[in-house]
Amino acid sequence: QPNTNRKFFDDASDSMNIFHFSIANNHDDTIRDLDKVEHKKSTKNNSSNKKGIAEEVVADHAWRQLNHIWSDEEIKKQMATKNQKHKPVTQEDKVMKMIMQAMYHSFNTMTGYRHEDPTAKSIEWRLIILESFAGVPGFLAAAFRHFYSLRALKRDHGSIYTFLEEAENERMHLLVCLKMFKANSITRALVIAAQVTMTPFLMMTYAISPSAMHRFVGYLEETAVDTYSNIIHHCEKEGTNLHKEWSQLQAPAIAKSYWALDKDASWVTCLKHILADEAHHRDINHTFAELPPNAENPFIKEHMKDFDRAVMRKTEKVMRDSLMRY
């Protein structure tokens, strides 16, 4: 018994030492040090898992791109910004706004979407197409800035990380949606068509004017916030199609892991977290549309805070597992 107790406190001490070092230094590699505390347990689990790592485990991004974990209060604040719209100022803004509006109305017609009491079916393939396309701009922006940094032999000032996180976040939205409903052959064809046609447009736009593409994406995210706000409203309103179809659904496992949701989290709760992400992307892109060239990334501190919180969550998990073992 004394040896068992000493082993537990040694594990706990290792975890807390790593945790304090991480908070003080903000070093990414401390995550790997923290995992050493669980080495024996993870080795045992991996050897028994012949089918590979579970999707919900991979969705835990503590070991790679860190997404923001929204609190209930932050969710409410983000949802309250649904009517926050950027008013075009420059000619460039007006052109991007016009293109976005034309695409938005065409998209509504194509998917059969109506604002009042939309059907679940019209929302399903709308979200799949929307999220598959929304993951493109961030990756393109990161690629352009990456190559420019290499070509110019200059720092990027941290912007690449923000755009990669945005692209990964949108891709996770897509994967979460695909856990809730399937993509038929028509939807898959539309996804391919959107990627083939819009990617060259976005590349050309960014090559000519990065601010124009960020403004376009900012307007795109405004429509995404509108869509998710309307979906959530109808999911919570009794007597609607979405309330009947979606109000009682559980969030998929990968969503619970990705946003650190409760075990009994609902699909509607998941949708609220997606909305919060989209509202944040809206603000990021409108901000970058106005930043001067080579400006510091104003969102770096947010990434650092997200990392610190991830370390805290990891430490708490190690402590809980240690208590359960002993």
Image (cartoon, rainbow, N blue to C red):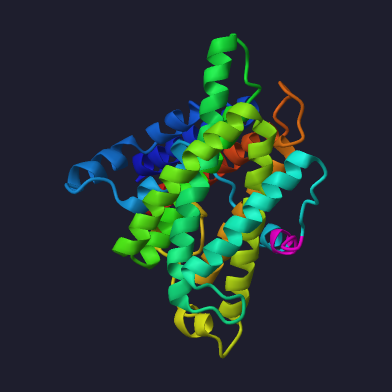
Measuring 50% from the left and 28% from the top, which residue is drawn there? 30
Magenta-tinted stretch: 77-83
Q: Is residue 323 above or below residue 142?
A: below
Measuring 19% from the left and 42% from the top, which residue is drawn there? 47
**Along the line of sight, which residue is nearer the eye, 181 or 75?**
181
Measuring 43% from the left and 37% from the top, which residue is drawn there? 11
Q: Would residue 78 be counted in the magenta stretch?
A: yes
Residue 161, position as x, y percentages in the image? 57, 31
**Along the line of sight, which residue is nearer the eye, 111 or 135?**
111
Quarter of the image for residue 79 reads bottom right
**Residue 275 shows up from this direction:** no
Is 146 placed left or right of 245 in the picture?
right
Q: Is residue 186 above or below residue 4?
A: below
Quarter of the image for residue 159 reads top right
**Along the line of sight, which residue is nearer the eye, 21 or 196?**
196
Q: Is residue 120 above or below residue 148?
A: below
Residue 278, position as x, y percentages in the image? 61, 53
